[in-house]
Image (cartoon, rainbow, N blue to C red):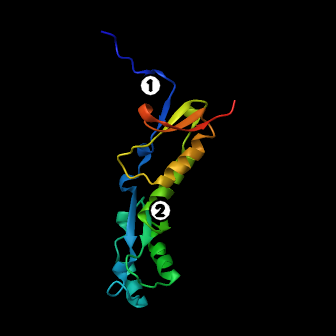
Amino acid sequence: MEEIVNKVAQSSLMVFDLEDYYPDDHVVDLDVSQWLTEGFILRETDFRSQLKEYDWSPFEDKYVALYCSTDAILPAWAFALVSVHLAPFALKIIHGTKELATIEWYQDILNKLDYTDYFENPVILKGCSKKAVPNQVYTLAIQKLIKVSKSVMFGEACSAVPLYKAKK
């Protein structure tokens, strides 16, 4: 019987897996409607008072997506005031969805990574993730990888889609 050889493991093919950098509980959201009367009406005195009394410690070292889940029409200063209270705790505050905050998380991580291991090597940008990596993050990652790699494919080694090949 012939021995089965894992040619992928023996190749210089490198895998870049965005799940390795998934934020898990480092990205959270915060709904400002909780401080509005009936979720819609901003009463400035009450709003300010509730923000002062709120426990902001759960947001320590987090990326926070600040949003309003109702159709309340809020002045820009309302989000700015929440940010004033949140800023001493949060790593970053994003006005928008949790997905936007996750993209911001990845952008910061991808900007800090050392890509020297991928230099002039073929790379697979791993797809088929078990975690909800936003599609925009793949766009961010490919921009980093094409600067250093010999080639980039997307997916898994058994069924990778070619995306980029360096010119010789």
Quadrant housing the N terminus: top left
Is 36 or 87 nearer to us in this picture? 36
Q: Is residue 7 above or below residue 41?
A: above
The tally of labels here is 2
Seen from the viewer's position, the closer of residues 116 and 144 is 144
Q: Quadrant of residue 70?
A: bottom left
Farthest top residue in view: 1
Looking at the figure, which quarter contains the C terminus? top right
Q: Secondary structure at mark 1?
A: helix
Q: Residue furthest left?
A: 1
Question: Label 2, label 1: how many angstroms apart (C-alpha)?
Answer: 35 Å
Q: Earlier in the sequence, mark 2 or mark 1?
A: 1
Q: Residues within 10 Å of mark 1 (few under 14, many from 20)?
A: few
Q: Is residue 31 above or below residue 39?
A: above
Q: Please give left or right for residue 147 compared with residue 62 in the image.
A: right
Residue 153 horizontal/vertical position (percent): 52, 37
- Return the residue at label 1: 8
* Rendered residue at 45%/76% (across/down): 82
Q: Nearer the viewer, mark 2 or mark 1?
A: 1
29 sits left or right of 1 in the view: right
Instruction: Judge left or right: residue 150 versus residue 103.
Output: right
Q: Which mark is residue 59?
A: none
Q: Quadrant of residue 128?
A: top left
Name the amino acid type tagged 2.
Leu
Secondary structure under tag 2 reads helix
Q: Which residue is mark 2?
A: 100
Three-letter code for the amino acid on which mark 1 is drawn = Val
Q: Crowding near pointer 2: few (<14 within 10 Å), some, many (20+)? A: some
**Which residue is depicted at the point 32% across and 86% down?**
38
Residue 77: x and y in percent read 51, 82
Q: Residue at x 45, y 85 (%)?
A: 73
